[in-house]
Image (cartoon, rainbow, N blue to C red):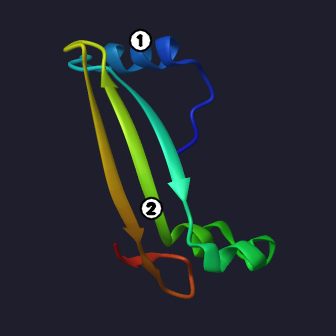
Amino acid sequence: MKVNCGISELCKILEDKGFKVVDRFTMNDIFMIPNTLKSKIKELASREILKDAILIRDIENQFKENRNKKITFKKKEFNKSGDILSQ
């Protein structure tokens, strides 16, 4: 889903619909791909590139004032329609 407004406006819309902010995070994601894809990266679709990527995620919790770093392997399998079969 694409959001066409700012975060403050989106929060206001959702609050008007009965939702409440309970936590607030800032995330910095770094995607790393295998060197084997480097030579053919321009020929591949985004899903093909990201299916074997490693995601380094730096998460800052603004309410609790703490920080967490995680490494996630984005091993995904897709069918011909592009739907995720497993991850």
What x and y, as percent, mark residue 65?
Answer: 24, 13
Q: Give the quarter of the image for residue 54.
A: bottom left
Residue 67, placed above or below residue 79: above
User: Which tag is nearer the camera, tag 1 or tag 2?
Assistant: 2
Q: Which mark is residue 56?
A: none
**Horizontally, is 82 left or right of 67 in the view?**
right
Q: Earlier in the sequence, mark 1 or mark 2?
A: 1
Numbered-mark total: 2
Residue 48, placed above or below residue 7: below
Q: Are marks 1 and 2 in contact (CB under 8 Å)?
A: no
Who's the residue at 34% across and 58% down the image?
A: 72
Q: Secondary structure at mark 2?
A: strand
Task: Determine the residue located farthest toward the right in the rendered image.
Answer: 42
Q: Secondary structure at mark 1?
A: helix
Task: Determine the residue located farthest toward the front in the rendered image.
Answer: 35
What x and y, as percent, mark residue 13?
Answer: 43, 17
Who's the residue at 54% across and 59% down the image?
A: 32
What x and y, as percent, mark residue 82?
Answer: 55, 77
Classify 10 Å Cα crowding around label 1: few (below 14), some (14-19), many (20 and above): some
Q: Give the quarter of the image for residue 62.
A: top left
**Horizontally, is 29 left or right of 67 in the view?**
right
Q: Which mark is residue 12?
A: 1
Q: Looking at numbered disc 2 in the image, what kind of residue is underneath it?
A: Ile
Classify 10 Å Cα crowding around label 2: few (below 14), some (14-19), many (20 and above): some
Who's the residue at 48% across and 11% down the image?
A: 8
Residue 32, placed above or below residue 80: above
**Horizontally, is 6 left or right of 69 in the view?**
right
Question: In the rendered image, which residue does mark 2 sit on?
Answer: 54
Q: How far apart are the two marked residues, 1 and 2, measured between alpha carbons?
A: 34 Å
Q: Looking at numbered disc 1 in the image, what kind of residue is underneath it?
A: Lys
Task: Determine the residue located farthest toward the bottom in the rendered image.
Answer: 80
